Image: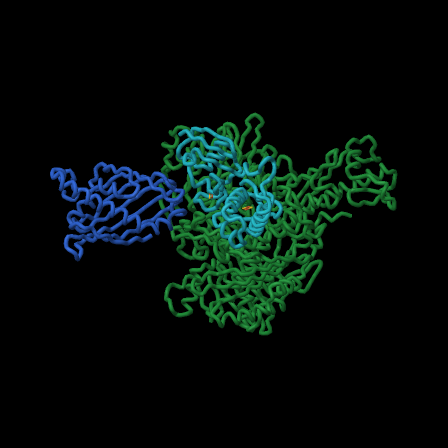
Amino acid sequence: MSTRIFGSGIKRREDPRLITGGAKYTDDMALPGMLHMAMLRSPYAHAHIKHIDTATAQGMEGVVAVYTATDLSLGAVPCAWLVPNSDLKTPAHPPLAADKVRYVGDAVAIVIAEDRYLAQDAADTIHVEYEVLGAVVNPEEATQEGAPQLFDDVPNNIAFRWIASSGDEGVEKAFAEADVVVKDRIVQQRLLPTAMEPRAALAQWNSGTGEMTIWCTSQNPHIHRFILSGMLGLAEHKVRVIAPEVGGGFGSKIPVYADEALAAWASMKLNRPVKWAETRSENYLVTIHGRDHIEHVEMAATSDGTITAIRGTVYAGMGAYLSTAGPGIPTILHGLMYCGPYTIPHARCESIGVFTTTTPTDAYRGAGRPEAVFLMERLIDQVARKLNMDPVELRRKNLIPPFEDGYTIPLGLTYDSGNYEVALDKALAMIGYADFRKEQAEARKQGRYLGIGVTTYCEICGLGPSQVAGATGFQGGLWESTIIRVTPTGKVHAMIGASPHGQGEETTFAQLISDEIGIPVEDIEILHGDTGNTPMGWGTYGSRTTPVAGAALVLATRKIKEKARAMAAHLLEAAVEDIDYEDGKFFVKGSPDKFKTIQEATLMATLAWNMPEGMDPGMEASQFYDPPNFVYPFGTHIAIVEIEADTGIVHLKRYVAVDDCGPQINPVIVAGQIHGGIVQGVGQALFEGVVYDEHGQLLTGSMMDYAVPRAEAFPEFELDHTVTPSPHHPVGLKGVGETGTIASTPTVYNAVIDALQPFGIKTMEMPLTAARVWEAMQRRNGSANGSTNGVHEGS
Amino acid sequence: MQIQGSYTFEYDQQAVWNILMNPDAIAKAIPGVKEMVPLEGETYAWRAIAKIGVASVSGTYSGIIRMTEIEAPDRYRLTAEGEGQQSVINGTALITMQPAQEAGKTVVVWDAEASLAGKLASIAQRLIKSAAGLLSRQFFGGLAKQLKAAEKEAKTVPAATSSHSMAGES
Amino acid sequence: MQVSITVNGKRYERNIDPRMLLVHFLREELGLTGTNIGCDTSQCGACTVHLNGKGVKSCTCLAVQVDGMDITTIEGLAQNGALHPMQEAFWELHGLQCGYCTPGMIMASTAYLATNPSPSEEEIRGSLEGNFCRCTGYQNIVAAIKSAAEKMQQEPVGV
Ligand code: FES
Ligand code: FES
């Protein structure tokens, strides 16, 4: 048998168009008669709109239309994750603000013109009279008495209050009886997802057929169709959403935004194609932001290092409106993961969603789990320090022992499979942990500050059973479906409802199919992104495409295989039970030279001249797949940093990652996901952070001020893996799209704090920029007396 | 955003006062100002159009410039309100002048507060803050140049001195 | 304004707005949409092209400024249907995911190799200072550039 295609790091099939400039992203498209839309956005974070004067813009040559809220007949932008038992408030989010703006960037008017510069110029002439109101950007402060109120019917700006608990009594008791308790206040700073391709939409209304086609930067075109048809008041089958090439998303292209709905509405109104494309600065201003938690967390342990309880209160900034999945992030995807990979018997998370006069937040790579893993790993290091224990040994002591088929944690989730300690040991061996400690001690004597950080994580992904989606208030299902169609000559079209945008499923899914039925990957095309030619699916996010859509694909392929087997049996005049399969060939048991290839079986089934009794012609299968559970990848990441004493610059010297996402279809692609994830997570630890001033003005509104990580900040990552299959997936796959981001932030953060031990620094606010680290070191040296700037000394 | 600074002119206080009250001179010295037209019914207010290029928010801004709290020849307050490029600019500066230690020179001190809103704030606030010193120097340097030019002119064509209508004299 | 610009070996005469950026000229006037736009402050490098053989960010110059000059975009890098070794290396070593930064990365790194034909890993990372990628974590981009450099040392190509 030839080398198995499953597990082989073949070159990606999507790349030829991407490396030659042949790929078409949304903004690359143009249609005859196309108009351009520009948005007029509020310069104030919070203000009443007194008057809008659009006369100048209306009169400009080349301007086709100017619309404000009063002109619109378009539904509100809905929130689609209505977390139950949380007293959730869902104030309307109008596509254009009518009487009040609630963040800088809130749209007030749109201009449609013959070209995009003209549209922008005309928007600039619109004069809006505002009555400026107070701004509030900090979610904890927004809940206090006297804070500016965004909505009349949302007292104290509290959007929801949600609690997950293993039992409050048990939690209280564990804390009361603990030998040690550590507490921390963690600020999960706001982040800008920064997909390199900004968002865009192109809408074309066909008044003759009553059909609307929308090309847009979406991670989930079927969800876009579902929601946009509702907003536009069109029947769903008359709306076609196409996500062409999409230049990254990281969660920011999940939500349905007002912008694409407005472009579509304008196209209907004017009966011409309308395009809208944001600039990077507009992207930073209005595309969702991530994180934004203020967390008060604590951990209880006994003196021998057994963790007995963890609890936290989270103020989660929702921004000015609830984005599509916003409320689900700091609750379901965060609070339920409070136990991590550890045998912690008692846990409680209270998550308070808060409106602030800022850009709405939603899922950003990892979404809720990075925050959970971060606080866990921070607290563990602090417990270890307090008990004078090695942080690795403390982790090891509390890890859940290996399990192959289900482990239920106190918060109710059942992890699918795990073998945490093996990954930990592998990573420790790779980094040479024991030796490093010696090196560190030596270095300290010479005034060099080395530090190591270790994270043992597990996470929840592969979203997820639809029943759970329903129970947690997600306004959709979370299954996937696929149609596999084999042409008469044995080529394959596999249509999936999920919508990859860089993750490489055009390759890995072809490998999955090829592995099952022996058709070469060159003969397999994975079609995605177009609701017009793909079956329903809920999209690409939450590391779910491979675990969920991949499972549907495998099961559909197996249906093809069984039909082909029956066809071959018929052609070979043998009983189906007597037909064996290997490498694309069906043969009669024991006589491998008497065979029919899958292509021959397909051709004969398509010609249908001579079908087995009761078999329909053709070679096609469809499959829906609703996963019975989530998947729980895990692993250990370790970082070594050195801090320059004179400057506070953190040098990331080594980074080891051992991840377990089950069997890997294509290890090269898996590694790529982890590399990218690590850099984004380290970005949060060291470089990235949104800054608003007290008036709600975004000060990090461009790449000049928002520090997107660059190549030179990183060493070559050292990767390895373990393989623990998911028991419930047809081929054992787990997701890997977010693990790098989830694990790397606390890993690098803990390494920096470890390096700063001689200074007694216990915690600092992220990002750990050189200035911040330097100041912390100076303060401790007693040679500077500046502000505390987010630095807290240890005791 | 607070901006403070000072500038020493090589002219006596009255000359400096005069030029600081001259809208034409100011219009020429403010970086980017294209025109300043007196507002009807007000003596010390002008409608101004400026072309400012900061990163990608370069473009035209329009607004009102006003002088208030005038105490000749010692101090006045300059305020500016402008909008454009989906941004709003508000600024107020208290400008005081006094004779320098060295005879014949005048020190101008300004204490300004500016706020930016919208796109300009998100892209350019930090740039502007770091550029504030430079811009102020450009402004006062520009005025000094004009004084110098006027002086030269006065030397060569004595009659020309009267062409500088001094707003501060009224 | 009348300009004459050679792009990928073909001369284009156009009458354009003097304010038009080179990147818009390429994308909108010539329909060469392989050159991408990732920012509006000249940071990201997605728009990098070759101008008389040197790497430039095409969002930083006006089309009229390059009148009479020679531009190569990602569409013009492959010669006679054969991929440039840099394109090959990006493909071979998984140096791209969503592909949005890729044309800029490839154009910037080919221009860089012209100035430093066998760079160290550290030098390569440094050379990418003006090119952002949000997907790959840079590791495979660096590996691709290194591998292309080695190949090109053995079999030099035109660009
Ligand atoms: S688009 Fe030119 S540098 Fe970003
Ligand atoms: S591959 Fe997506 S930004 Fe580089």
Please indicate whether residue A357 sits to the left or right of residue C76 in the image.
Answer: left
Q: Residue A731, position in %: x, y?
A: 72, 50
Q: Residue at x 24, y 51 (%)?
A: B94
Classify A715 as above or below A101: below
Q: Tell me if residue A165 can be seen.
A: no
- In the image shown, does A437 or A133 lie closer to the viewer? A437
Residue in the image at 43% along x and 46% along y: A102
Q: Residue furthest top?
A: A208
Q: Position of residue A139 (x, y in %)?
A: 46, 55
Residue A375: give x, y in percent of width and height: 54, 61
> What count of labels does the image hold?
0
Output the letter for the chain in cyan.
Answer: C
Q: Which sits in the foreground, C52 or A30?
A: C52
Residue under the image location 72 percent in, 50 percent down:
A730
Q: Is residue A666 visible?
A: yes
Vertical relation: A644 (above or below) B14: below
Q: Residue furthest left?
A: B158
Colour pattern: by chain
Using the image as rendered, state which of residue B114 and residue A69 is in the foreground. B114
Quadrant of the image occupied by residue A573:
top right
In the picture, one chain is green; tell me its letter.
Answer: A
Q: Position of residue A190 (x, y in %)?
A: 48, 53
Q: Colour of chain B?
A: blue
Say which of A618 and A352 sits in front: A618
In the figure, residue A485 lies in which quadrant?
top right
